[in-house]
Amino acid sequence: LVRAGDGGDYVVIRTDAAGHALPDWRSATGSSEVDVSEIVALPDGGAVVSGQGSFLDGGYVTVRFDAQGHTVFSDVELGEIGNPLGPARVRADANGDFIIAAAPESMFGEPLAQVWKLGADGSRRWTRVLPNPLDDLASLQVGGLALTAQGDVLVEAFSVSDQRFRLLRLDGASGEVLLDSVAAVGGTPTTLTSAPNGRVLVGGYDFIDSSGHVGARMVEFDAAGAPCRSSMDLAMFSSIAATAGAEGWTVLGTSAFVANVGNDAVVRRYDADGPCDGADAIFANGFEAAGLR
């Protein structure tokens, strides 16, 4: 399944396992144009797609397709004035409900991060505007979204003015904020993932010189949500993506760019249960720490 947009329509381009084209799925959103952010394949053979409607007043649109490609529901979240700023992230929980996180424009012209939950039929369960440690008028954006095994919501919310990596945990049933934890390391977050043992990894990048070069950054939070290990010396010079599995964290980035040569993709793996006492500050624990090219 491949997400796509065509004018104001959400389109799901499909192929079978052998790569043969299948009929596309299509749903009109009511906007004049769309910008599709994410797609999640569902256990019943359907999919949920999230993204932006028309820039000025289209809000964030979430469409749920069934296994035959029919539209089950189409939800629009306008925020305060209807303008979508940045992508919409979507996840499906074990009950068939959907969590969406995005940052619509506030009446003061700033991104205003919020999370909302839709039932399997599209009914609104709850909507939560995330607390801003600066003030209610300042920018607040979404850097990552994940769900816990218990169905709670993990979200990274950051401000351009205060770019420390921050982890919030929301109650999956009510949207109540259960945890708000901030690490000393920061930058611009681009990934959030949760390991089976409850630890959470937030990763991204920060600027390392005045020429605009960036270096990867990541912070691990323990199962209780407290900052654990961190790394500002990944030898990756890009934003990073990360996933979690039984073996630990798998992190993808790039090596330094060399003029007339280029750079390489770099994959590293780390355990997800190292000590949080500072002795393992840069994940130097011998767990597959070498880059693979």
Image (cartoon, rainbow, N blue to C red):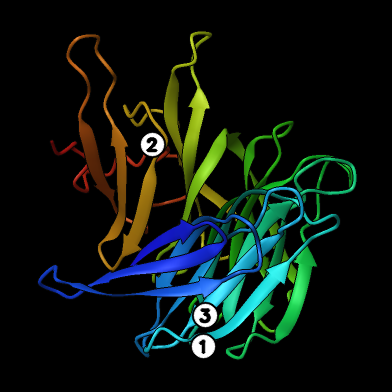
Q: Is residue 168 visible?
A: no
What amino acid is labelled 1 in the image? Answer: Gly
Q: Which residue is mark 1?
A: 96
Instruction: Give residue 171's position: percent from left, percent from top.
Output: 68, 76
Whether residue 208 is situated above or below residue 279 in the rendered picture:
above
Instruction: Kindly identify the residue that appears in the image at 42 percent across and 59 percent down.
Output: 4
Classify residue 251 as left or right of residue 157.
Answer: left
Crowd band around label 3 with a 10 angstrom C-alpha radius: few (<14), some (14–19), many (20+): many
Viewer-closest of 237 and 245: 237
What amino acid is labelled 2 in the image? Answer: Ile
Instruction: Kindly identify the residue that appears in the image at 37 percent across and 51 percent down.
Output: 242
Q: Which residue is mark 2?
A: 282
Instruction: Kindly identify the residue that appears in the image at 77 percent across and 40 percent down.
Output: 139
Instruction: Give residue 11's position: percent from left, percent from top.
Output: 43, 67
Q: Earlier in the sequence, mark 3 or mark 2?
A: 3
Crowd band around label 2 with a 10 angstrom C-alpha radius: few (<14), some (14–19), many (20+): some
Residue 64: which disc? 3
Classify residue 194 as left or right of residue 235.
Answer: right
Viewer-closest of 48 and 176: 48
In space, the residues marked 1 and 3 are separated at their CA atoms by 11 Å
Viewer-closest of 70 and 129: 70
In space, the residues marked 3 and 2 are separated at their CA atoms by 41 Å
What amino acid is labelled 3 in the image? Answer: Arg
